[in-house]
């Protein structure tokens, strides 16, 4: 299995630009999670989906952040407009929709906003 | 909601010694407790997990114990090696949604 696939691995862009992060979960997994990791705040859950439906987006920082899951094999996290404080590593994780199953993380996207 | 606390935040041990990381949780409904290892610049990876119907689980040099009454669980690494150096995260979960509540992480350094 290829695991959770994220793209791009690195993104450097200027403040104000739109940023789109992409995630392909493991085939057969029907829960998907977006996390943000920084030194200051650790690992934060931004939003998660079950069967392509957003369940909890209370971790999304503000209206500049949005996430979609149009089908079972693809999700995006968009930041528009981006700000320097959005710089972080963004991880996507997926899991089978059964109780007591581990989450499998992608390699992350290292985002730098200049 | 669930609250997971993890201690210590940093830990240094001599190679060959044991390391113990402790976590507490608040929600008695939590019934699944995974541990993740994150090496520098890499993704968190599951190293061991335990379910609430089990008190202890071992996998070679690592073990996890769970005390449901006290609502705490611990990771034990024996005969530590330099490659064990990483950040370790505990988490608690319940239900089928599998939302994980992560601890704040422990940075483990094994000194050769």
Image: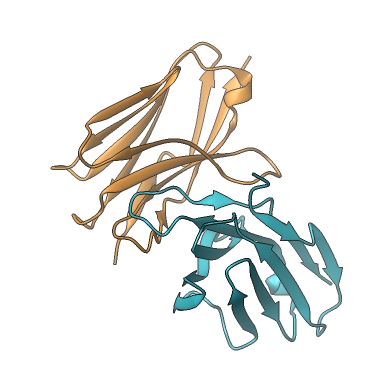
Report whether B2 appears left or right of B104.
left
Task: Residue at 48%, 78% (x, y): give it.
Answer: A54
Percent x, y for residue B34?
40, 43
Residue A112 in sight from this viewpoint: yes
Percent x, y for residue B77?
44, 22
Residue A56 in sight from this viewpoint: no
Percent x, y for residue A13?
86, 73
The extreme front residue here reads: A28
Instruction: Indicate the colour of chain B.
Output: orange
Asked if residue B36 is positioned above or below residue B28 in the image, the reply reads above
Which of the colour schemes (rainbow, by chain, secondary structure, one colour) is used?
by chain
Q: Quadrant of residue B109?
A: top right
Task: Residue at 82%, 83% (x, y): give it.
Answer: A17
Asked if residue B86 is positioned above or below residue A21 in the image, the reply reads above
Percent x, y for residue A82?
75, 80
Task: Residue at 18%, 42% (x, y): give it.
Answer: B68
């Amino acid at each position: 299995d290829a695991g959770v696939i994220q793209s791009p691995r690195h993104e450097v862009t200027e403040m104000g630009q739109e940023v789109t992060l992409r995630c392909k979960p493991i085939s057969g997994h029907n829960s998907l999670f977006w996390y943000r990791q920084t030194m200051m705040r650790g690992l934060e859950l931004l939003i998660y989906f079950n069967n392509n439906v957003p369940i909890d987006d209370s971790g999304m920082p503000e209206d500049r952040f949005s996430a979609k899951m149009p089908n079972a094999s693809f999700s995006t996290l968009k930041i528009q407009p981006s700000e320097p404080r959005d710089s972080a590593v963004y991880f996507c994780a997926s899991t089978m929709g059964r109780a007591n199953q581990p989450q499998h993380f992608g390699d992350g996207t290292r985002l730098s906003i200049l | 909601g669930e609250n997971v606390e993890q201690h210590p935040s940093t830990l240094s041990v001599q190679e060959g010694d044991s390391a113990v990381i402790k976590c507490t949780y608040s929600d008695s409904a939590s019934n699944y407790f995974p541990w993740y290892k994150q090496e520098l610049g890499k993704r968190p990876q599951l190293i061991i997990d335990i379910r609430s119907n089990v008190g202890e689980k071992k996998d070679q040099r690592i073990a996890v114990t769970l005390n449901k009454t006290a609502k705490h669980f611990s990771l034990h690494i024996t005969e530590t090696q330099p490659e064990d150096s990483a950040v370790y995260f505990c988490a608690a979960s319940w239900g089928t949604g599998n939302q994980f509540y992560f601890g704040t992480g422990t940075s483990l350094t094994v000194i050769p």
